[in-house]
Image (cartoon, rainbow, N blue to C red):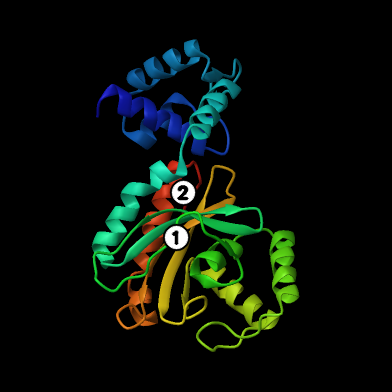
């Protein structure tokens, strides 16, 4: 392990700790010699990123370190971060992958990687959609706070919609039940909700405040990409969404 990796590991250990950490504790946890741990901590202390309690001799992160982290997070571009994963999803599934971000009580497509298939689902970048239908909308809605969810459900009630594109009925009660299931499983699958012949699977993306900011999706024609097929790819999709969220600063399990 080289010095940069050791620095990162020590900072990560301090960030993950419930309180301060001692040199011996960090040494045991990371398998790094005490002298090396002390030398790195001393350098970080000189930089103002960690501080040592004069009585306990234990170390913790400072506000300066937090400021550096927040500055880095503010410079992250969710589209740039997500793009490699969208390409990986398209290659792995053969279907169209897309990134949506939450904009108040709606979502908007900001990027897609189209399927190479002759018959494919075409995503219109810039298109805004309600959050109460489609796998992407529900993947975002299920993880919003209670007041926000109620505001979106009120929009649904006022819309007067009771039948979706594929002919399935939808009610306030059925939406609530579905959102609870989505939150539990970590992804959403929907078929025939906006377009009768399209099925999609989506997973939420979170930021450093643990707030849902968007989702990634895979979608295709139901003749080839039906609900069982979407379920088959749900694990991969959740994995990629967690990686994006992690880069954006979210704590992922």
How many residues crowd around disc 2 within 10 Å: few (fewer than 14), some, or many (20 or more)?
A: many
State whether residue 170 is above or below residue 39.
below
State whether residue 11 is above or below residue 206.
above
Q: Nearer the viewer, residue 51 or 87?
A: 87
> Mark 1 — residue?
124
> What's the residue at 65%, 84% (across, down)?
162
State whether residue 154 is above or below residue 222.
above
Q: Mark 1 against mark 2, which lies toward the viewer?
A: 1
> What's the residue at 31%, 48% (across, down)?
84
Q: Quadrant of the N terminus?
A: top left
Q: Is residue 158 left or right of residue 202?
A: right
Q: How many marks?
A: 2
Distance from Cα at disc 1 to Cα at disc 2:
24 Å
Q: Quadrant of residue 115?
A: bottom left
- Residue 224 appears at what percent x and percent y? 29, 80
How many residues crowd around disc 1 within 10 Å: few (fewer than 14), some, or many (20 or more)?
A: few
> What's the residue at 69%, 73% (across, down)?
156
* Cβ atoms under marks 1 and 2 closer than 8 Å: no
One can see residue 61 in this view: no
Q: Nearer the viewer, residue 43 or 192?
A: 192
- Residue 240 appears at what percent x and percent y? 37, 55
Q: In the displayed orientation, state which residue is furthest to the top.
A: 46
> Mark 2 — residue?
245
- Residue 27 appears at what percent x and percent y? 37, 29
Quick one: SS at disc 2? helix
Labels 1 and 2: the sequence-earlier one: 1
State whether residue 215 is above or below residue 48.
below
Q: Nearer the viewer, residue 183 or 213?
A: 213
- Residue 87 appears at what percent x and percent y? 29, 54
Quick one: SS at disc 1? loop
């Amino acid at each position: 392990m080289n010095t940069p990796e050791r620095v990162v590991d020590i900072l990560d250990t301090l960030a993950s700790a419930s309180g301060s950490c001692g040199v011996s504790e960090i040494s045991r946890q990371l398998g790094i010699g005490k002298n090396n741990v002390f030398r790195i901590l001393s350098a970080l202390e000189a930089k103002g990123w960690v501080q040592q309690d004069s009585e306990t001799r234990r170390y913790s992160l400072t506000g300066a370190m937090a400021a550096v982290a927040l500055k880095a997070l503010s410079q992250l571009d969710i589209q740039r971060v997500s793009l490699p994963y969208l390409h990986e999803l398209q290659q792995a599934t053969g279907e169209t992958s897309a990134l949506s971000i939450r904009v108040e009580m709606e979502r908007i497509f900001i990027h897609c990687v189209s399927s190479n298939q002759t018959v494919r689902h075409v995503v219109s970048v810039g298109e805004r959609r309600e959050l109460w239908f489609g796998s992407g909308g529900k993947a975002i809605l299920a993880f919003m706070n209670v007041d926000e969810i109620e505001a979106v459900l009120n929009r649904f009630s006022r819309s007067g919609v009771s039948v979706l594109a594929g002919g399935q009925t939808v009610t306030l009660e059925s939406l609530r039940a579905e959102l609870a299931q989505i939150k539990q499983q970590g992804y959403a699958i929907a078929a025939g909700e906006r377009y009768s012949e399209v099925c999609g699977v989506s997973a939420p993306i979170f930021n450093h405040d643990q707030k849902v900011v968007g989702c990634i999706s895979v979608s295709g024609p139901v003749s080839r990409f039906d609900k069982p097929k979407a379920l088959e790819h749900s694990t991969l999709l959740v994995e990629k969404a967690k990686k994006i969220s992690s880069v954006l600063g979210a704590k992922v399990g």
